[in-house]
Amino acid sequence: MEPVIVIHGGAWAIPDHLAECSKTGVKNAAKCGYSVLVNGGNSMQAVESAVRILEDDRSFDAGHGAVLNANGDVELDALIMDGKNLAAGTVSCIKNISNPVTYARLVLEKTSHSMLTGKGADAYAEKLNIARVSRDELVTEYAIQEWEQYHKYKQSVTNLFNTEKAHDTVGAVAIDSEGNVSCATSTGGITNKMVGRVGDSPILGCGGYADNHTGAVSTTGHGESIMKVTLARLVLFYMEQGDTPKAAADQALEYMLHRVHGRGGLVAVSKNGQWAARFTTKRMAWASIQNGILTYGLNPEEKFQECLDNFSCR
Ligand code: GLY
């Protein structure tokens, strides 16, 4: 099986000043994940490595660069899932951690549970000696400006998402040379969310899902809408009925738009290595690598290609 990785950096109305760094960020993450795959790593290692790159990149709403909740604090959600055995690790409402995706993987590997949240998750992170960072280290000037705008104009989060003006989420899907698929998703959620609000990203079947029998999906967009339609699992359902990843993604996103007026995007890979990156927001930065060809885009129906001859993390 030819390995494939597909990355997204969040579906939203990415402003022009973040367009180039968003494209560079998803390309870096794709190269890193692909280097893991071509050097004998499995799809779990690839999606984790790729999402860590995005969590460390301040252009994205995950880890460093996360948006702020109603109290101006950072609460992070993440998910990772292994399509080989349906094992999953997820964390929600965690604080002071740079790479929630790695913590989610530790929940998968070291506990008998699928999700840890809030204070319990904080306590377990201490026990595992996971490095803690201050809130200020995670917060960007842009996140503060976004938060101030919400407060100034008292805008509702839902309305903003429907007009495509919300910073959002990162994710990756991959298939390795053994045919194993995985997904990972990580987010700071949505600006001005209530303290304790958990979105779709750490919820299995919503923010992501992976099953070797079909494929893997990582989603982005308005979390409450995504949860209502269980977006990741809906895409896989359409793929199980025979749709390509692109047709399944379009059908599921269209359903979410018309049924609950929610916008978003996703990346998907099938068990045969077909892939798609689709969205109903103004923009979504995405990148994919298959057979040494890097494909990427930002605007609807836009697609650029580059031939790569070496792969490395940055
Ligand atoms: N899609 C991320 C969130 O709504 O939290």
Image (cartoon, rainbow, N blue to C red):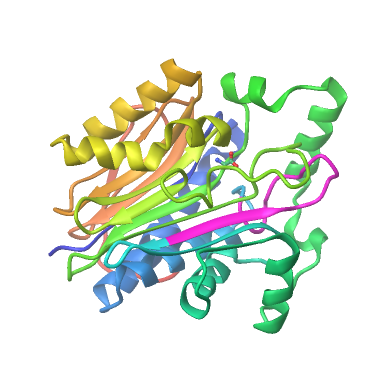
Count of numbered circles on the image? 0
> Is residue 94 part of the magenta span, yes or no?
no
- The magenta stretch is 62-80
- The percent coordinates of residue 1 (x first, y second) are 12, 64
Residue 88's place in the image compared with 239, above or below, is below
> Which picture quadrant has residue 136?
bottom right
- The percent coordinates of residue 112 (x first, y second) are 50, 74
Majority secondary structure in the magenta region: loop
Residue 308's place in the image compared with 15, above or below, is below
* Residue placed most toward the observer, 271 or 29: 271
Q: Is residue 258 left or right of residue 120?
A: left
Q: Is residue 177 left or right of residue 198?
A: left
- The percent coordinates of residue 192 (x first, y second) are 76, 36
> Is residue 67 part of the magenta span, yes or no?
yes
* Residue placed most toward the observer, 47 or 289: 47
Which residue is outermost to the front?
112
Residue drawn at the location 76% of the way across and 45% of the way down:
68
Residue drawn at the location 78% of the way across and 45% of the way down:
195
> Which picture quadrant has residue 88?
bottom left
**Is residue 81 shown to the viewer in this render?**
yes
Residue drawn at the location 65% of the way across and 24% of the way down:
158
Q: Indicate the quadrant of ligand 1 in the picture.
A: top right
* Residue placed most toward the observer, 33 or 214: 214
Residue drawn at the location 81% of the way across and 66% of the way down:
134
- The percent coordinates of residue 169 (x first, y second) are 55, 46
> Which picture quadrant has residue 157?
top right
Q: Is residue 223 left or right of residue 271?
A: right
* Residue placed most toward the observer, 264 or 308: 264
**Is residue 297 shown to the viewer in this render?**
no
